[in-house]
Image: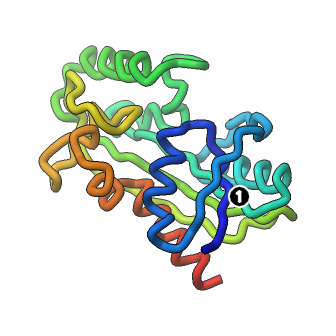
Amino acid sequence: MTTLWVATTNRHKAREIAEILEPLGFEIVAPQDLPEVIEDGATFAANARKKAISAAAHLGRPALADDSGLEIEALGGEPGIHSARYAGPGATSEENNALLIRRLDALGLVDPRARFVCHAVVAAPDGRVTAEATGRVEGVLRWPGAGGGGFGYDPLFHHPPSGCRFSELEPGRKNDVSHRGRALRALAEALAGA
């Protein structure tokens, strides 16, 4: 087993990462004492690299970070890299979802196209990026929210091939088709080939 330290304070995300990578031979550890990183990059990739490099330097161990979010074509790519704080710093998922619905309703949209994007990075303690990968999944947004699983925008994101919202999928099925699952499996392949 290869141990990866995950740079996230989001327990839902840490659990998803472990569920995806542990069957592929990785032990996932989520430390509690990481320094705060200002996510001021212009892309998911820039923010993921910044978080992974900071965590690896702090821990003195290889660290994994991802940056992910929702992009909506009709909103010019919003909320994008601001997905977690769309309704402001410290916003809850409910507040972010409510703001998104208000904006989409104001445009009179029905089933607007959307995609989830995830960029995952592993960095070494010396600051080198040793592997990175991006995953995407296409869908449409529907509201009100449905389902009791998942987190973030999952209750609004309808995945046509599955016929339901991400929040309605069993965790294993969601991980099979999600942006994070795709990025992390590609990342695992890159690490295996390194």
Residue corresponding to mark 1 = 63
| Residue located 64% across and 72% down the image | 2
Q: Give the camera-side residue of 102 and 176.
A: 176
Quarter residue 23 falls in: bottom left
Q: In the rendered image, which quarter is residue 137 located in?
A: bottom left
Place of residue 86 in the rendered image (x, y in percent of width and height, measured from the top left): 50, 24
Compared across the picture, whether 136 is left or right of 159 comes to: right
The answer to whether 78 appears left or right of 146 in the picture is right
What's the residue type where badge 1 is placed? Ala
Q: Quadrant of residue 119?
A: bottom right
Q: Secondary structure at mark 1?
A: strand
Residue 49: x, y in percent? 69, 54
Question: Which residue corresponds to the image point at 43% horizontal and 38% vertical from the top-left?
Answer: 77
Q: Is residue 160 above or below residue 70?
A: below
Relative vertical location of residue 120 with respect to residue 36 in this rendering, above or below:
below
List x then y, in percent, for residue 84. 52, 30
Residue at 79% across, 49% down = 54
Q: Residues within 10 Å of mark 1 (few under 14, many from 20)?
A: many
Query: In the rendered view of the protein, which quadrant contains the N terminus?
Result: bottom right
The quarter in which the C terminus is drawn is bottom right
